[in-house]
């Protein structure tokens, strides 16, 4: 069975106003063709097609579409290296300096796919970040698969924050460590309780003959909060004095955005380099993880990263150490503070927040100015309202991504907002005004008592569907 979607814009759609872009986006939610091949040996293919159609009709599918927004508050280009062209410029310089390169690797890392260029790049990363070795792979998925499927041994125990990224959880599923225990998100007391339980029930771990491997993220991508890493490490060392409690930290959303000497991440900023066994970091389209994982199936069976991919990563690393990158990090922090101040001081937001219509759980205390903040600032909504808010933002030319179950827990629907160094203060004001105008409309609908009334943007969206 093949699903085919018309993802190519018509010639008259190349230049679109925000509302035109909204229509264009919603039109992409229609599956244009469903072709069931009689020759394909797919079991229950009729039932599969019905499930796909039901998902599409109920908004449960997530079809590919071309961007239709005019203001970016969703992509991961946080420092704006791609948006401004800075990465492209450095990328082309690096290509020019390496004429005669081979575009593809030609094999896996263990089958002559390792190039001198990649070896040099990995040595540079290791020296700069301050680790024994570095390994560059294709993606966060590949890295987490390699780490979690290979590092833990039989008899080890995995303990991890319940909000760890799906790529890490997928790696744990194929780990040799069969005992795996989540702890409540950023809850130090529950972490200690779980660790004490492992010590009580695993004699090998208690004796230091097996490891307890702890997985956390630095910045959590769905909530935008920060891991209490120092406290977790201190608790682990007190419970397991043999030193067999080892940490793996996913720095996908903090590396490059914080830390000394070119934004080298949360672990380095906290001074915990010697306390963390493996750091997983992302950089543009290249992903590096410190450690030796050459027994990972995902590496043995995959072609090594291509030369252009490595060049993009190396170019990004060079930019991170420049004064312009530091200016971008400083500006991003100030812009995030400006956004939070502007939104939380708006009387419409205050009223909507009091009614439970909109929430920002980690920024609702008055003392949020006194704690570290991140550029990830999700807006929580009532159940099933995230799509309504997303439709409203898209109509206003803003790309707001709805995040609902099963990506997050039931009742924790939200629209994820990423701020960037290429966003302006005027764009932030536009975002705040759009959020508050939606909140005002929703409060008017609730006050009317009409349970069948949909907000304007949602009606337009469903008409297009």
Image (cartoon, rainbow, N blue to C red):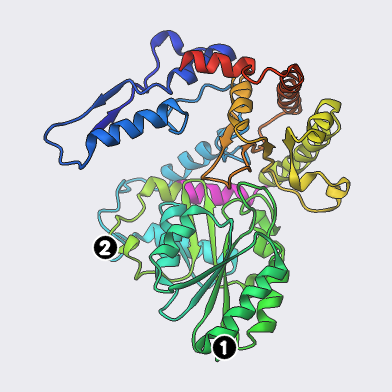
Which residue is depicted at the point 61% across and 46% down? Answer: 222
Tell whether 222 sits left or right of 309.
right
Regarding residue 402, the answer to whether it shows in the image is yes
Q: Is residue 300 left or right of residue 410?
A: left
Q: Residue furthest bottom?
A: 207
Quarter of the image that includes the C terminus: top left
Q: Position of residue 171 (x, y in %)?
A: 43, 61
Which part of the image, by quadrant, shows the N terminus? top left
Residue position for label 2: 112
Magenta highlight on residue 318? yes
- In the image, residue 373 sits, relative to residue 119, either above or below, namely above
Q: In this view of the protein, which residue sits in the foreground, 93 or 334?
A: 334
Which residue extends farthest left? Answer: 39
Task: In the rendered view, tell whether residue 349 sits above or below residue 120.
Answer: above
Residue at x-position 42% and y-position 21%: 28
Identify the magenta region.
312-322
Report the residue marked by disc 1: 206
Query: In the displayed structure, would residue 374 be above or below residue 217?
Result: above
Q: Nearer the viewer, residue 377 or 292?
A: 377
On the image, the x and y values in percent for residue 404 come to: 56, 39
């Amino acid at each position: 069975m093949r699903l085919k979607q018309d993802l190519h814009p018509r010639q008259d759609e190349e230049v679109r106003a925000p509302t035109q872009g909204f229509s264009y986006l919603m039109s992409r939610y229609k599956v244009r063709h469903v072709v069931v091949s009689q020759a394909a040996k797919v079991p229950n293919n009729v039932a599969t097609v019905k499930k796909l159609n039901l998902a599409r009709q109920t908004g449960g599918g997530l079809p590919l579409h071309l961007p239709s927004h005019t203001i970016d508050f969703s992509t991961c280009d946080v420092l704006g290296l791609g948006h401004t062209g800075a990465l492209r410029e450095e990328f082309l310089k690096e290509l020019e300096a390496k004429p005669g390169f081979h575009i593809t690797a030609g094999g896996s890392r263990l089958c002559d796919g390792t190039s001198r260029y990649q070896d040099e790049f990995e040595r540079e990363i290791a020296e700069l970040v301050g680790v024994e070795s570095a390994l560059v792979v294709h993606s966060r998925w590949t890295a987490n698969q390699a780490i979690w499927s290979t590092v833990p041994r039989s008899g080890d125990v995995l303990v991890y924050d319940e909000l760890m990224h799906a790529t890490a959880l997928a790696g744990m599923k194929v780990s040799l460590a069969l005992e795996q225990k989540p702890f409540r998100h950023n809850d130090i007391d529950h972490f200690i309780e779980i660790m004490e339980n492992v010590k009580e029930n695993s004699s090998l771990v208690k004796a230091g003959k097996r490891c307890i491997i702890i997985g956390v993220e630095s910045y959590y991508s769905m909530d935008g909060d920060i891991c209490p890493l120092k406290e977790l490490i201190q608790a682990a060392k007190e419970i397991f004095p043999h030193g067999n409690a080892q940490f793996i930290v996913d720095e996908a959303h903090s590396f490059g955005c914080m830390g000394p000497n070119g934004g080298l991440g949360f672990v380095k900023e906290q001074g915990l380099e010697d306390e963390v066994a493996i750091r997983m970091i992302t950089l543009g389209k290249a992903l590096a993880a410190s450690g030796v994982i050459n027994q990972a199936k995902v590496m043995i069976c995959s072609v090594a990263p291509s030369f252009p991919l490595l060049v993009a990563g190396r170019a990004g690393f060079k930019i991170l150490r420049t004064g312009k990158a530091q200016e971008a990090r400083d500006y991003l922090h100030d812009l995030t503070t400006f956004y939070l101040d502007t939104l939380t001081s708006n009387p419409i937001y205050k009223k909507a927040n009091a009614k439970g219509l909109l929430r920002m759980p980690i920024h609702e205390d008055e003392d949020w100015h006194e704690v570290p903040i991140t550029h990830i600032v999700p807006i929580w909504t009532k159940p099933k309202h995230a799509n309504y808010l997303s439709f409203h933002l898209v109509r206003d030319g803003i790309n707001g991504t709805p995040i609902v179950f099963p990506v997050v827990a039931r009742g924790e629907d939200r629209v994820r907002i990423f701020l960037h160094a290429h966003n302006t203060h005027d764009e932030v004001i536009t975002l705040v005004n759009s959020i508050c105008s939606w909140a005002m409309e929703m409060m008017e609908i609730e006050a009317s008592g009409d349970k069948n009334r949909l907000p304007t943007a949602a009606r337009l969206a469903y008409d297009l569907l």
